[in-house]
Every structure is written in structure tokens, then in C-alpha cells.
Image: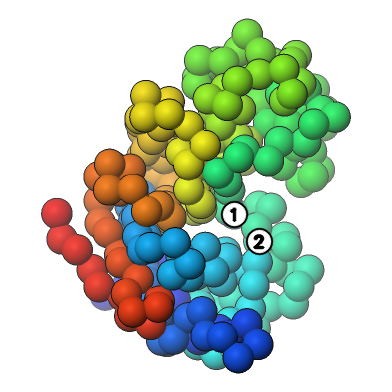
């Protein structure tokens, strides 16, 4: 059997005397959408940040395509996040000084792509997600739903192997949330990307192939079959 695309095993992490993760485990295959559920403060985002190489766990193993992430340097993990991972956060977190098109092109530009090529690819994703008309707008001049679609385009523009989505619908109404989740899951499956989705909303988790629930103060994971 081949190992999962990304996996974490026996992950422990504390903030001072307060444990956030105690033996957490999770894996995701290429093309799979996995929802991580749990109450507020249960450690969902902490788990996501560990798996994405943003934060080092105190102990445990994280493997991506056969590489142990905890053994990489900070620079190596930064390069991995830039080239292999995409991120969608609750409030979009677009750069306010850049246009929407420039925001979407940013991962490509950071990877060394020429401006014209990067912005052309960004424009194609804006078209794909139905927001080509706001390409020249700045984040402060667009709606929350448009901002989140732009953030989704930015996450997908570099064709990542894994998309990490942390409460991507938390700032949207139910209709906007449904639209973003539909776009996220469809785009990920079209490109073959795996998706790790953090949410506390069952209606959002329903878009996933599988649910993983953090229980008892994020000390255990329970897999929920559909």
C-alpha cells in the first residue's frame, strides 16, 4: 500500500502549560476532501497549521509525499508552502494595496513567474470563479463573497497539491458559503488537489468525502464515515 499524500501521527503541541493537541492523527489522499470538525477552541486550526508546516508540533510525525516535514528547515517549509500548498482563510486576507488580479497572481510572482504570465493565469482563475469583473478592484471595494472567491482563486492559481481551508465560509451568509464550498470542492476535484477543511458547521462539512472530529479538548480524532 502507498502512504497518504499528507499525514500526521501522534501530534502533540502545548501553548505554555495548556495542551492544544494530544496524539492527534489525520491523513488525506490526493483528490480527497476531508473536513476537520470540533467546537471552538478545540485545536482545529492548530492541527491545520501543523500539517501545513506553519507551526512545528512538540512531538509527532508529519509526512508529505514521503518527506518528514518536522525535519525540514524553516526556509524549506516556506518553499513547500509556496510551491505545493494553497490556503484559504476565514476573512480572505487579501493584500489591501494590491488589486484583486495582483493578489491572485501573488503566489506565482513569489515563485519567480513573470508578471504578465502570472497575471494572465490569475485572470483565467477569476473568470473561472465568476469574478473577472473585479480584477482591477482593490479588496476594500468588493463584497465578502467576492473577497472569498478571490482568496480561493489565489489558493488554486499555483495548482497546489493540498489546499488548506480554515473556516472559509465563516464570514459569509449561508448562500455565499454554499457558493464558495461548491466552487472549492469542484475546483479541487478538477485539479486533483487534496483539501483539508476546518469548520464547525455541519452544512459545510457535508461537502467533504470524510469528516474527522476533534474530541475531548482535541486529544482524540474520530473518523465519521458517510
Residue at 55% in and 90% down: 59
Residue at 25% in and 56% down: 210
The residue wearing badge 2 is 80
Image spot of residue 152 (x, y percent): 55, 35
Residue 104, compared with residue 5, is above or below; it is above
Residue at 38% in and 82% down: 219
Is residue 55 found left or right of 20 in the rendered image? right
Q: Can residue 64 be seen in this view?
A: no
Mark 1 lies on a secondary structure that is: helix
Image spot of residue 189 (x, y percent): 36, 39
* Cβ–Cβ under 8 Å for marks 2 and 1: yes
| Front residue of this view, candidates 113 and 35 | 35
| Front residue of this view, candidates 150 and 31 | 150
Q: Quadrant of the C terminus?
A: bottom left
Residue 139, compared with residue 194, is above or below; it is above
Residue 138, compared with residue 159, is above or below; it is above
Image spot of residue 40 (x, y percent): 44, 61
Mark 2 to mark 1 CA distance (whole Å):
5 Å
| Badge number at residue 2 | none
The residue wearing badge 1 is 84
Amino acid at each position: 500500500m502507498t502512504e497518504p499524500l499528507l499525514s500526521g501521527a501522534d501530534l502533540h503541541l502545548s501553548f505554555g502549560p495548556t495542551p492544544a493537541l494530544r496524539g492527534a492523527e489525520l491523513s488525506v489522499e490526493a483528490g480527497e476532501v476531508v473536513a476537520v470538525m470540533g467546537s471552538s477552541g478545540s485545536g482545529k486550526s492548530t492541527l491545520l497549521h501543523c500539517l501545513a508546516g506553519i507551526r512545528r508540533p512538540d512531538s509527532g510525525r508529519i509526512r508529505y509525499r514521503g518527506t518528514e516535514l518536522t525535519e525540514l528547515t524553516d526556509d524549506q517549509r516556506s518553499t513547500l508552502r509556496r510551491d505545493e500548498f494553497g490556503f484559504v482563510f476565514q476573512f480572505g486576507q487579501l493584500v489591501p494595496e494590491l488589486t484583486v488580479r495582483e493578489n491572485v497572481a501573488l503566489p506565482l510572482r513569489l515563485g519567480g513567474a513573470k508578471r504578465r504570465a502570472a497575471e494572465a493565469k490569475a485572470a483565467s482563475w477569476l473568470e473561472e470563479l465568476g469574478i473577472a469583473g473585479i480584477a482591477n478592484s482593490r479588496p476594500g471595494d468588493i463584497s465578502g463573497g467576492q473577497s472569498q472567491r478571490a482568496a480561493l482563486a489565489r489558493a488554486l492559481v499555483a495548482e497546489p497539491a493540498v489546499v488548506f481551508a480554515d473556516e472559509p465560509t465563516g464570514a459569509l451568509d449561508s448562500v455565499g458559503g454554499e457558493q464558495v464550498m461548491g466552487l472549492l470542492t469542484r475546483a479541487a476535484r478538477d485539479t486533483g488537489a487534496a483539501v483539508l477543511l476546518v469548520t464547525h458547521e455541519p452544512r459545510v462539512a457535508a461537502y467533504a468525502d470524510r469528516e474527522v472530529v476533534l474530541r475531548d479538548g482535541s486529544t482524540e480524532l474520530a473518523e465519521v464515515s458517510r
